[in-house]
Image (cartoon, grey):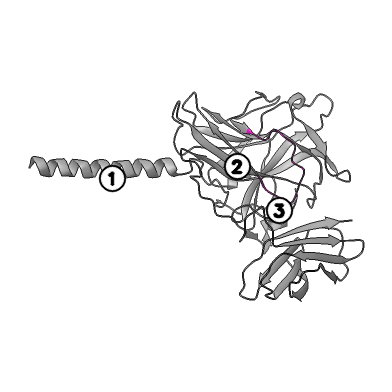
Amino acid sequence: MVMKHARISLLTLVVLALSITRSQAQNLVPNGSFEEYTQCPDFWNQMSRATGWSRFHRSPDYFNACLVNGLPGGGMAGVPGNVAGWQIAATGQGYAGGYLWCEPVEDIVNIREHSGAMLAEPLQIGVPVYLSFKVSVAANGSLENARWSASGAGMRFSMNPYLQDWPPVVPNAAAIHMDFVPTDTTVWYEVTGTYVPDSAYQYVTLGNFFDDANTAVTQINPGGNLDCAYVFYDDVCVSYVENGCGFQSGLSEPLSGESIRATLSFSTQVLTLVCTMQSGEPLWLSLLDVLGRAIWDERLTPGSDPWLAVLPSVTDGIYQLKVQTMSGDIVPVKLFRTP
């Protein structure tokens, strides 16, 4: 009986240890890639439609490729094209967005937008956690076209929801943050770090927690109509295990290595492609407008030289280049637009 009892106790301890390991390996941020939603967003200021997330300051936005009246995000809050910019989700089909900085207007300074969520469990005091999130600079939106990019995109923890009225409290501190100004609007930057909590924090917040004097800005889009810096967020992770979140990219290849680089010129109506694929397999190209309608299709056999295509009349706007192999696989593409 003693031996049998000892074996049962040992087995129980093993199961308990496995349970703890799984718990610590999980992402403590609910819906960290913004895939789950209570309702498909169809306008701005709907952060609360992303399951587990809400507005913590001002009016951050939620974007998703889900359909409203047959259009991604109702044509306003879609992915990849929306009112703030054009970007494919780093994972899946959803992401969040908000202002990092805006040029002061009269006595209004430190304009920030913050999104937040309650963690799956409170952080353990003194136990390091691994943090990461992805951020992308937004520009050329269907309504807003930000002129600036800014430093400061970060993550901060609190005991209670980081709700703020006006004027905001700017602590000039974050658990991790981007300490340089990102300028490439075509990529997702990954911000990572380790943090040792000094309290059993229960909430995580995304945004810029540095005041105007401690935020660096760079003009990236002189022709824009908005004196602000706006970014998208995706793949938010807090885990006790390094690389413990295991996000799957929405692209079929790593974010850092595209297979096709494309440039669309509105002045010459020419689409130029440089293809690095070596298989020589034919590809099907489709140029989609902001509503997801194909306005041009063509077949391409990859080669060593840049490939040019003269398009029908294309007006200035937001477009997506969809590239598929003969087997139906999506090929990652970076599409740059020129005047």
Q: Magenta-highlighted stretch: main secondary structure?
A: loop
Q: Kindly identify the amino acid type of the residue bearing the numbered disc 3.
A: Gln
**Quadrant where the image shows the N terminus:** top left
Q: CA distance from mark 2 to mark 3?
A: 16 Å
Q: Is residue 118 left or right of 311 when viewed as pictured?
A: left
Q: Which mark is residue 87?
A: 3
Residue 214 at x, y = what percent?
A: 74, 25
- Residue 45 visible in the displayed image: no
Q: Which residues are magenta?
A: 177-189
Q: Is residue 180 rendered magenta in the image?
A: yes
The image quadrant that residue 121 belongs to is top left
Q: Earlier in the sequence, mark 1 or mark 3?
A: 1
Residue at (69% x, 67% y) in the render? 277
Residue matched to label 2: 133
Q: Is residue 175 rendered magenta in the image?
A: no
Q: Kindly identify the amino acid type of the residue bearing the numbered disc 2.
A: Phe
Q: Earlier in the sequence, mark 2 or mark 3?
A: 3
Q: Which mark is residue 15?
A: 1
Residue at (69% x, 57% y) in the render? 74
Q: Earlier in the sequence, mark 2 or mark 1?
A: 1
Determine whether label 1 and label 3 are within 8 Å by CB.
no
Label 3 element class: loop
Q: Is residue 191 above or below residue 305?
A: above
Q: Is residue 249 above or below residue 304?
A: above
